[in-house]
């Protein structure tokens, strides 16, 4: 793929925006832990939060990788 270093960095910024967005959506849409315990849905609550945190961690990892590619292309 023939993409400039600035293009890779722009993609990294977009991907890094997914991490706080996923956490924000999780905090907004998910019920509290106490509400999940009261309803008996604690295991799905933990699984869903695990998926939300994995999404955030993967977005940060991918963003850092894209930044490294972009910076290496800007140096060349």
Image: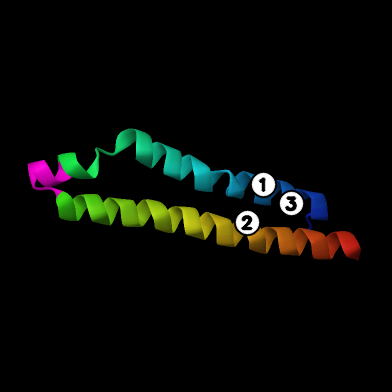
Q: Are marks 1 and 2 in contact (CB under 8 Å)?
A: yes
Q: Mark 1 vs mark 2: which is more N-terminal?
A: 1
Q: Which residue: 40% across, 37% down?
A: 25
Residue 49 vertical position relative to residue 61 in the rendered view, above or below: above
The residue drawn where x is 66% and y is 46% is 13
Say if mark 1 contacts mark 3, CB within 8 Å.
Answer: yes
Using the numbered discs, state the Cα–Cα distance from disc 2 to disc 3 in whole angstroms: 8 Å
Secondary structure beneath disc 1?
Answer: helix
Q: Circle 2 sits in a helix, a strand or a loop, which is it? A: helix
In the picture of the structure, the residue carrying the numbered disc 3 is 9
Classify residue 14 as left or right of residue 4: left
> Callout 1 environment at 10 Å: few (<14), some (14 to 19), or many (20+)?
some
Can residue 71 be seen at all in this image of the molecule? Answer: yes
Quadrant of the rendering where the C terminus is positioned: bottom right
Q: CA distance from mark 1 to mark 2?
A: 7 Å
Badge 3 crowding class, 10 Å Cα cut-off, few under 14, some 14 to 19, many 20 or more, is: many
Percent coordinates x, y for residue 67 in the rendering? 72, 58
Magenta residues span 36-41
Residue 1 visible in the picture: no
Label placed on residue 41: none
Which quadrant of the structure image shows residue 74?
Answer: bottom right
What's the image's color scheme? rainbow
| Residue 19 located within the stretch drawn in magenta | no
Report the label total: 3
Residue with the mark numbered 2: 63
Circle 1 residue? 13
Say what secondary structure mark 3 lies in: helix
């Amino acid at each position: 793929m023939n993409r400039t270093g600035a293009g890779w960095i722009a993609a990294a910024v977009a991907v890094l925006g997914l991490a706080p967005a996923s956490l924000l959506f999780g905090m907004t849409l998910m019920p509290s832990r106490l509400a999940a315990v009261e309803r008996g849905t604690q295991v799905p609550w933990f699984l869903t939060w695990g998926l939300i945190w994995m999404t955030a961690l993967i977005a940060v990892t991918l963003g850092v990788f894209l930044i490294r590619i972009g910076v290496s292309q800007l140096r060349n």
